[in-house]
Image (spheres, coloured by chain):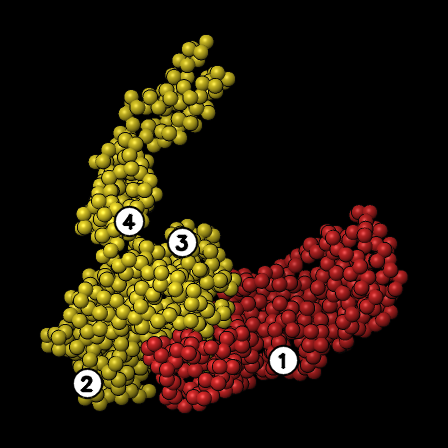
Chain colours: A yellow, B red
Amino acid sequence: MEEFSINNVGVKVGLEIHQQLATNKKLFCNCMPIESDEYSIKFQRKLRASKSELGEFDPAALFESTKSKTIMYYANHESSCLVEQDEEPPHELDEDARSIALIISSSLKSNIFSEIYPMRKTVIDGSNTTGFQRTMLISQGGFFNAGDMKIGIQSICLEEDAAKILGEEGSTRKFGLERLGVPLVEIATEPFEVELTKIKKIALSLGRILRSTKQVKRGLGSIRQDVNVSIKEGGGVVIEVKGVQQLDQLEKVVEYEAKRQHGLLKISKKIQENNWNFSKNDKKDITELFSKCESKIIQSAIKKNHKIIAISFKNMGGIFGFSPYEGIRLGREVAELVRFFGIGGVFHSDELPNYGIEESDLKDLKKILEIKENDAFLILASPEEKINTIVDQIVLRIEHIKDHGIPIDTRLATQAGETKFLRPRPGAARMYPETDIPPIIITKEELSEAEKNIPKSWDDSIKELESKYKINPQLAEQIFDSRYIGLFEKIIKEINTNPTFVASILCSSITNLERSGLDSNLLKNKEIMKSFQLLESGKIAKESIEIVFGNIMAGKSKTIEEALKNTSIQSVNEDDLEKIIKEVVEKNEDIIKNQKERAIGPLMGIAMKKLRGKASGEIINNLLLKNIKKKIKNLE
Amino acid sequence: MSEYSGYDGNSLEFLKTNKISIGDSVKILADITYSGIIMPRYEHSDDKHIVLKLKSGYNIGLEISKIEEIEKIVSTEKIIEENEKIEKNEQLPNILLLSTGGTIASKIDYRTGAVTPVLTAEELNSSVPELAKIANIDAKVLFSEYSENIMPEHWLKIAEEVNQYSKSDYLGIIIAHGTDTMHYTSSYLSFSLAGFPIPIVLVGSQRSSDRASSDAALNLIGATKFLTECKTNGIYIAMHQDENDETIACHIGTRVRKNHTSKRGAFQTVGDDPAFLIVNNEIHNNMKTEFFTDKEFEPKIKINEKVALVKYHPGYDPSLLKHIIDSNYKAIIFEGTGLGHIGENMYSMVKMANEKGIFMGMTSQCIDGRVRMTVYESGRDLLDLGIIPLENMIPEIALVKAMWVTGNTENLDEIKEIMLNRIACEFSK
């Protein structure tokens, strides 16, 4: 096995950044993108492949349709309406999203089209109720600087975000509709050839340009990056890798993908040398033959009435296990493809006997399939209705690798920094004009308005933060890049407190808690705001903030009040409590005059408003009653 | 599609000068270089742009004034569609599919950029391969019209076409139709073809069949299953029961209405459950009576369009009614308030109409429920003035029935009698 070296293959990388816009409404209706897992609406759909404008079917769409999934959608009235349910045509394009997209295009010096055509991009995995994503190409060309590198822009699109996947059970897939239709800007760079270590810097710079507009969303899931990878010998094949979660992962993913592509070329050569061709007779139903096989996987398939199929590959002995680089094998390519049809088990000749499939089982098999010493074979089990499609897909893929090299996939980045098969790469046939929306005309006035609103550069924004809030450069960078910049400015504006203290709580303290494994998504902005208010009014101490946040981020409390109780932080001392109660009694003398002791009712309400969560109701009640009685005596 | 569809003025001039037509692959030098295919242009657009489909599949409008150079690369990549012929299976029943247009048969129209009904019945059939497993489907296009352009003359055309098949070996007939006025057509067929021996189902869709999420396929499948298994006759409308791609509701053609502008489940049987529900492979029958009161099939394909549907409302100007009377209308269907009332200010005109021998029928704008004109004084007054209460007939259905009745007879007594004769479930007893 060779050691893989990225420098020998010449890799080109392109980035695709998907950034949610902070319009607080959706692109084609007025619903707010509110995260919630309470769903009052549930409905079921099936999607079918439909033809493109040019009368063709998109390969990715056809592929999805072969999987024939039932889709369950979950929704609530707060975050979606009939538009998301595909029960009503889209409304007008949101003005805010339109103007932010133009500003972003302008700041990247991209050429904006004066006539923009909303399109339907076919996506029939269920993540869009319509079966397509509404998208429009706003501009092409342009560039930005990442340090001393000048990176070209290919295209900028304005589009709808997809629905959130909730899970998959058998042939049913579940989605929540709250995110569907949130405006996204998709920015694709020109391919560039740089040292792998610099890719992160490029992505970061682009992200910062977007954040400088202050009109893009922050926080988890608000920005996603895909990366396109092609190698010099790949014959122009560009593989799109989706779902790179962290910028730190980019380098690893690109390296793995380059290695895989280069490895596939070596596998391709080997298949060519073996002079393999598929013939119909290479496929046999072995359900009967394997009925006595003791493999657990095979037995459970037989119990479910599944079919078991074997495919032989003439002269291909050793091909599935052949590993040009570590972890790169044809066997793995096939396994990934098969897994995508919801099938667990595929065995190949280079790993058998194993998994309970014995030498004796193989002997019979080889006889029936006429398998010779240098032949290879695959065994797979699947429900009958799917099996022919799956076999076709496997053969097609291996034929493609043989004849054309790297198959044109869309792939998914894994946690480990590798990539796995997601679906065939969709082509131009996936695009269809969105007939529900007329073309959008961009006027000269709009263009010059966008020009005027080009934000300050990231460097200038940092300098502004430094001087406005008197914080050090490092903290300014941290707070600007964090999801809390909006909240930070709001806190400083509304509460007279120390910006450096607020910024370091928002950056360091929360990050520290995250590092210890806690979830910052549980800590809502509203609660953070409240905690600084409590701090300002002296109800809690500085030291308590981290403890309280930790309690919430650990999922033990939902609100600050709850957390204060749960962490038994004494929020109000007895003297203060007494003082507040006395104040309530003094201010409401009239009620006590009129209602005597019955005044406890209304006054309890008033006191609780001030003291909820800071002292128990029982204590407040007792104290209040004592003071009311005293007051009545005084009044007599 | 013409060579320059949608282009005119400067943009047409530009294409002609450069010898470029729609479908050509071109390379364009402007602010940057673009390559793609020239696409047709919508009629409402200006003459300063050309439309280009880029390699990525996106369409964009390029300003002509910014184009420095345009070069044809490969000549005419034809925008054509092929349809596979579907083989017949002798074991399966035969079904006739007539297409009249509507969303169910729609795809993009380059004249306007919106959808238009252009799919042929054949295309419709082949786009839903499941149909071929249920029945052999012969497809025929009668015309391609949107609902709102369907006129009584179209009803006649459909009825006459269908009439030819009363003795054919078709198990049933599907009519693809725009949804907005589908229930007018279904009721006209119910009256004019009363007693028709085989079942007829009108099918529409709320999402055009060029979308992956179209309801057309399931509606067609449901209708086909219904025809092969219902073992009855009558005129029905088959559409989604609700927002789920699961149950198809088959409604009595004279008791159904479109009650939502855009939802899949827009069609509802008024005041009752749908006649049939098709869930997966099961058919649930909820029919309470025979569809046709008279079993004898005797087509009466005639119509008189001089019937008015008058929706009474506070502030209705009685002189509008006078205009109807003066224009020699043969019948007026009132969509009255509540149990079937119209204001006192209308009385003198109603009297005039009655004296002129115009048939007047009362329905309710409540849509659901029966008119009952003896409960209030005003109702009794109207009865005296010659208005006939039309039970729980849906106003639009009463209109269609009156058009049909007055097309077949001019005798007022006969008109009154037939209007209250239950012919095709149009009201319940």
Q: CA distance from mark 1 to mark 4?
A: 61 Å
Question: Circle 4 is placed at which residue position?
Answer: A484
Q: Which one is in front, A539 or B244? A: A539
Residue A186 in sight here:
no
Q: Position of residue B418 (x, y in %)?
A: 81, 66
| Picture residue at 42% right of the left edge, 76% below the top | B63
Quadrant of the drawing holding the N terminus of chain A: bottom left
Q: Chain of mark 3?
A: A
Which element is circle 2 on? Answer: helix
Q: CA distance from mark 1 to mark 3?
A: 46 Å
Q: Are marks 3 and 4 in contact (CB under 8 Å)?
A: no
| Picture residue at 51% right of the left edge, 64% below the top | A89
Q: Nearer the viewer, mark 2 or mark 3?
A: 3
Question: Circle 3 is placed at which residue position?
Answer: A24
Q: Nearer the viewer, mark 4 or mark 2?
A: 4
**Residue B143: which disc?**
1
Question: Circle 2 is placed at which residue position?
Answer: A269
Q: CA distance from mark 3 to mark 4?
A: 16 Å
Q: Which one is in front, B245 or A358? A: B245
Earlier residue among tags 2 and 3: 3
Q: Chain of mark 1?
A: B
Which element is circle 4 on? Answer: loop
Q: Are marks 3 and 4 on the same chain?
A: yes
